[in-house]
């Protein structure tokens, strides 16, 4: 029985699932052709969404159905009415179809025609049953850049060859992470150890920073025979934006369905799939860590280096670096998950959320937040007031050396353009004008340094987050005095009790919160204006919440 499904895009609403909204969907593979003659278009859109993860076959595509399904489609794809057919039979059906879409895995193409509305490479839909009785869920479509998308296509295009060759990045991770790279590092570091460029050092690796940059740059930028003349840097780029968009879409879906689902690891091309930005950043860190480890080993083993010939020393250093690799991959990165886990999440296109389990992966990232601080915002985060938090590496440290080799930019032209934009911005900034403007604003701003507007923060309907910023400023003042921990704790407790109080206890909690603020104002004159303003905001918030309780 057909149902009515609703999907929204860019503020427009389309009603689907009626007889006029049925379409034909064809799946082409090397050895077979599949056809479903009458699919609802919301199912067709979901099938199109599966291509976002770049599956290599229909079976692989079906394995990521849970990452894209919504209440508007079936639980599992195996029940979809696909039948095997010859290519000639497929073309006969398409010729009389009013709306159609073809997924060609062999040539990595999506074609659609007839009345099938163009979707584009990057689209987002909100899909649900018409009455939303079974919920609502977003569908994000992020077609990989090496897939061709031909919309409003003619029927003849289905049997025509691709317009451009398939240019999918292929990553040789064994070369990048394994013995090839580590041997390169060992050889180059030992060359420097025997050269006049070896710095005088008391063990501080900062003395080797210039050499580290040189070894890292040469590794990335030197053409290699085992890469067919390519440079290793080319393996890192070409797909980061697409991969990040897919991962971000899954993160947004988590807030709707409460689940993160990783792509399988048994896909045919999983081992060589391109990098996202998180693995790219981790690879930069990995290279630097291994090079630094080699410098440290040389400093500690100068006598051994003198007694052995180069091949023997290089082998000992290589063995050491291989162990360093395993240790580095397994240890926490900056207090968070291990590099191995970050890389796996990036390759399987799932975001990393504190304490959030991922279907298909055994490890659960631990909650990183430190619970022994006095910041009220941090305490709210630790209590889960804002829901699960997701973290990512922004990659700014790749740009600190100001060299294209380490940049997040894919091409030299992109990197030069970005630098030009930054340069024009810097040239247009007059520091004296900025200071004057800042001083003028300071004369008219509120008593708070961190709260510049009375406008509510998005998603902060009760105003608690904005209050948290204010309480944090008061805490920072108290921390400037010795032995004020009891005052800070009293303030945080009063604020916490107010946030958690229900309608019956809210006025009492507000009274206690205000009394603590008044006491602090009496003891610390610089808090008088902050205390008075926050008390008035407490009164306003309490009135609004009490009004809502009565509705």
Image: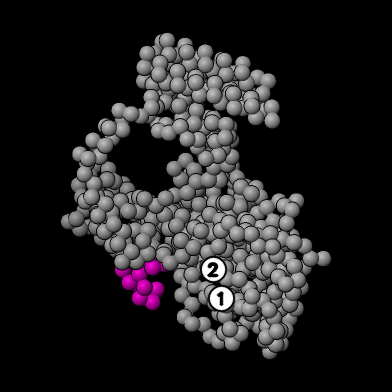
Relative to 299, is 468 above or below? above
In space, the residues marked 2 and 1 are separated at their CA atoms by 8 Å
Q: Position of residue 15 (x, y in %)?
A: 69, 62
Exactly how many numbered labels are in the figure?
2
Q: Is residue 427 magenta?
A: no
- Lateral position of residue 108 relative to residue 209, left or right: right
Direction from residue 324 to residue 198 in the image, left or right: left
- On the question of residue 10 being in view, the answer is yes
| Mark 1 element type | loop
The residue where tag 1 is placed is 151
* Residue under the image location 31 percent in, 30 percent down: 442
- Viewport quadrant of the C terminus: top right
Query: Which of the pair 173/148 is nearer the observer?
Result: 148
Q: Which residue is mark 2?
A: 120
Quadrant in which residue 98 is drawn: bottom right
How many C-alpha atoms fall within 10 Å of the one at disc 2: few (<14), some, or many (≥20)? Answer: few
Residue 68 locus on image (x, y percent): 64, 60
Is the C-beta separation of discs 2 and 1 under 8 Å?
A: yes
Q: Answer left or right for 296 relative to 494.
A: left
- Residue closer to the observer: 118 or 63: 118
Q: Quadrant of residue 405?
A: bottom left
Of residues 134 and 180, the one drawn nearer to the viewer in this rendering? 134
Measured from the top left, where is residue 483 in percent x and y? 41, 15
Q: Provide the residue span drawn in magenta.
A: 221-235
Q: Which mark is residue 174?
A: none
Pick out the residue farthest to the right: 1
């Amino acid at each position: 029985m057909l149902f009515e499904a609703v999907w929204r895009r860019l503020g427009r609403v389309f009603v689907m699932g009626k007889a006029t909204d049925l379409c034909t969907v064809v799946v082409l593979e090397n050895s077979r052709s599949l056809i479903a003659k009458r699919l609802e278009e919301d199912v067709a859109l979901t099938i199109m969404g599966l291509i976002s993860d770049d599956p290599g076959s229909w079976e692989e595509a079906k394995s990521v159905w849970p990452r894209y399904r919504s209440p508007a489609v079936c639980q599992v794809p195996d029940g979809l009415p696909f039948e095997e057919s010859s290519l000639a039979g497929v073309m006969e059906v398409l010729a009389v179809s009013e709306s159609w879409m073809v997924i060609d895995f062999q040539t990595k193409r999506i074609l659609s025609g007839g009345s099938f509305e163009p979707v584009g490479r990057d689209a987002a839909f909100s899909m649900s049953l018409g009455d939303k009785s079974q919920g609502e869920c977003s569908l994000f479509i992020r077609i990989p850049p090496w897939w061709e998308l031909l919309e409003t296509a003619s029927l003849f295009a289905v049997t025509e060859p691709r317009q451009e060759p398939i240019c999918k990045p292929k990553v040789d991770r064994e070369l990048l992470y394994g013995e090839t790279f580590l041997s390169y590092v060992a050889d180059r570091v030992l060359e420097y150890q025997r050269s006049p460029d070896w710095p005088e050092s008391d063990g501080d690796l900062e003395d080797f920073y210039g050499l580290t940059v040189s070894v890292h740059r040469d590794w990335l930028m030197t053409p290699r025979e085992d890469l067919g003349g390519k440079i290793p840097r080319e393996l890192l780029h070409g797909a980061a934006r697409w991969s990040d968009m897919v991962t971000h879409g899954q993160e947004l879906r988590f807030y709707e369905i409460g689940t993160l689902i990783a792509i399988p690891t048994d896909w045919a091309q999983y081992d060589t799939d391109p990098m996202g930005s998180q693995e790219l950043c981790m690879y930069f860190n990995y290279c630097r860590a291994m090079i630094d480890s080699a410098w440290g080993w040389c400093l500690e083993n100068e006598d051994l280096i003198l007694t052995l010939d180069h091949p023997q020393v290089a082998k000992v250093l290589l063995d050491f670096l291989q162990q360093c690799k395993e240790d580095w991959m397994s240890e926490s990165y900056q207090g968070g998950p291990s590099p191995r886990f970050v890389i796996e999440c990036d390759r399987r296109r799932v975001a990393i959320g504190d304490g959030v389990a991922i279907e298909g992966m055994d490890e659960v990232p631990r909650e990183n937040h430190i619970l022994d601080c006095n910041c009220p915002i941090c305490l709210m985060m630790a209590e889960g007031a804002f829901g699960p938090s997701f973290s990512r590496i922004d990659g700014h440290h790749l740009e600190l050396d100001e060299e294209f080799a380490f940049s997040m930019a894919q091409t030299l032209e992109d990197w030069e353009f970005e630098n030009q934009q930054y340069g024009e911005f810097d040239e247009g900034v007059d520091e004296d004008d900025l200071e004057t403007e800042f001083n003028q604003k300071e004369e008219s701003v509120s008593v708070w340094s961190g709260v510049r507007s009375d406008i509510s923060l998005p998603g902060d309907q009760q105003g608690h987050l904005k209050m948290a910023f204010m309480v944090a400023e008061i805490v920072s003042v108290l921390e400037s005095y010795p032995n004020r921990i009891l005052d800070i704790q009293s303030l945080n407790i009063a604020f916490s009790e107010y946030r958690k109080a229900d309608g019956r206890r809210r006025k009492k909690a507000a009274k206690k919160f205000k009394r603590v603020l008044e006491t602090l104002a009496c003891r610390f004159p610089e808090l008088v204006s902050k205390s008075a303003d926050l008390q008035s905001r407490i009164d306003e918030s309490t009135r609004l919440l009490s009004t809502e309780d009565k509705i």
